[in-house]
Image (cartoon, coloured by chain):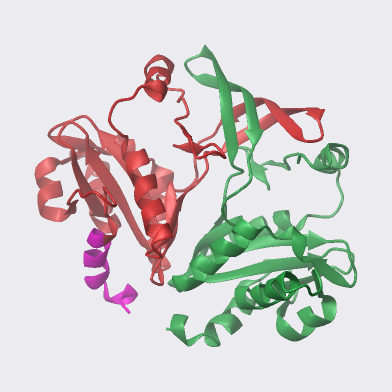
Chain colours: A red, B green
């Protein structure tokens, strides 16, 4: 997840899974991550009064804090925690949006293990409350982005639980989700895809 | 803001303004804070399929992380940051809710300085998108809780900007906001007050 410095500079936090790789990645100048693109898109939506969608801060368990001075508390021991919800939520023209963003290097399928069960439960609860839950999946090698409505993810999840395949095939994305056409401003205009979802769901249609 | 340990135990993070007081407070066994009460209420709403509302994690700027092992990344230097939004948001029966929770020890008024300008801007943006923005104010000495719709807060804020009083009088709360009747489960049932707001705002009425 991207953490913003007050000066607007971004810091890509390291992850516990692969320190070496990630910490290099943090300071590399290669193409933007899906996360960076989405935060840029959300900034665009916000500044143009299109939607108010924010990435949630990384949940961190603070254990020790020092006070060298009243003006600057320094956290000296803390740990990354597993988020209990998805990474992004907000409001767009009266609709509550809630989504997770995932990247895969695979050219053929998206492994469902990238989505945690507690996130599935959260998206199900959101859907029950007439919120719009979805997942944005980026096939980074192909540079293709898909908006996958929760009900589609749920169906594939159930298939896996029933002993079926543990991933969603690219072909299934092409037929059952909405591909995002990449643009310039914003680069990932995912709200266009959401319009399609909204117009197919009477319970949240206005 | 309350940080939850995986085991559900709560940790009230220290703040930079008054370390001594807060760090005592963190480990005291006195009555619940507004924050604890609201998190309990949100848990109740979630488990009873009434609403999905979460407190956002405390935004923390991570500077240094150590890897004693792959399984546990330890943050060794980090700093609390100013949130760019309100503390709570979520969805309730198709409505996007977004609010800030504040306590005051005063028995007569609520100082507007407790609300940051960026939070006012955020709530204004939320309102533009037909979200429901409000502030929950607890007069802790009186143990009285009020739901203040954004437009009311905005009016008082503008009054202050125009050189008027820098606080909202308790009398104004009583006449212009909705008092929450305290109960048992949940102790602070603020959604009842929100129903009143929704029913008075055609643009977000269903």
Compared to residue A150, the image places residue A138 above or below, namely above
Q: Residue at x 47, y 48 (%)?
A: A85
Compared to residue A118, the image places residue B99 above or below, namely below
Give the side of residue A165 with respect to residue B23, left or right: left
Give the side of residue A186 with respect to residue A87, left or right: left
Compared to residue A187, the image places residue B5 above or below, namely above
Residue B12 location, quadrant: top right
Give the side of residue A120 with respect to residue B34, left or right: left
Residue A160 location, quadrant: top left
Residue B12 can be seen, yes or no:
yes
Q: Is residue B124 magenta?
A: no
Q: Main secondary structure of the magenta part?
A: helix
Residue A48, percent from left and from top: 38, 62
Residue B43 can be seen, yes or no:
no
Identity of the residue furthest to the top in this view: B68
| Residue B121 or residue A85, whichever sits in front | B121
Q: Residue at x 28, y 52 (%)?
A: A185
Residue A55, percent from left and from top: 45, 47
| Residue A182 or residue A205, whichever sits in front | A182
Q: Residue at x 47, y 29 (%)?
A: A13
Residue A110 location, quadrant: top left
Which contiguous range is marked in magenta? Answer: A192-206
Residue A190, percent from left and from top: 27, 55
């Amino acid at each position: 997840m991207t953490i913003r410095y007050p000066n607007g500079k971004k810091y890509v936090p390291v992850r516990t899974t692969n320190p070496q790789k990630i910490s290099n990645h943090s300071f590399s100048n290669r193409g933007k991550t899906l996360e960076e693109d989405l935060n840029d898109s959300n900034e665009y939506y916000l500044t143009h009064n299109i939607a108010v969608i924010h990435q949630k801060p990384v949940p961190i368990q603070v254990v020790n804090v020092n006070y060298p001075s009243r003006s600057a508390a320094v956290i000296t021991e803390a740990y990354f925690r597993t988020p209990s919800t998805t990474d992004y939520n907000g409001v767009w023209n009266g609709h509550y949006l809630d989504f997770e963003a995932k990247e895969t290097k695979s050219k053929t399928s998206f492994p469902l293990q990238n989505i945690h069960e507690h996130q599935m439960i959260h998206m199900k609860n959101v859907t029950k409350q007439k919120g719009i839950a979805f997942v944005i999946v980026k096939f980074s090698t192909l540079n293709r982005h898909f908006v996958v409505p929760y009900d589609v993810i749920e169906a594939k999840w159930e298939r896996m639980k029933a002993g079926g395949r543990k991933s969603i095939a690219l072909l299934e994305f092409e037929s059952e989700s909405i591909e995002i056409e990449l643009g310039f401003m914003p680069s990932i205009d995912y709200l266009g895809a959401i319009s399609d979802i909204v117009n197919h769901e009477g319970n949240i249609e206005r």
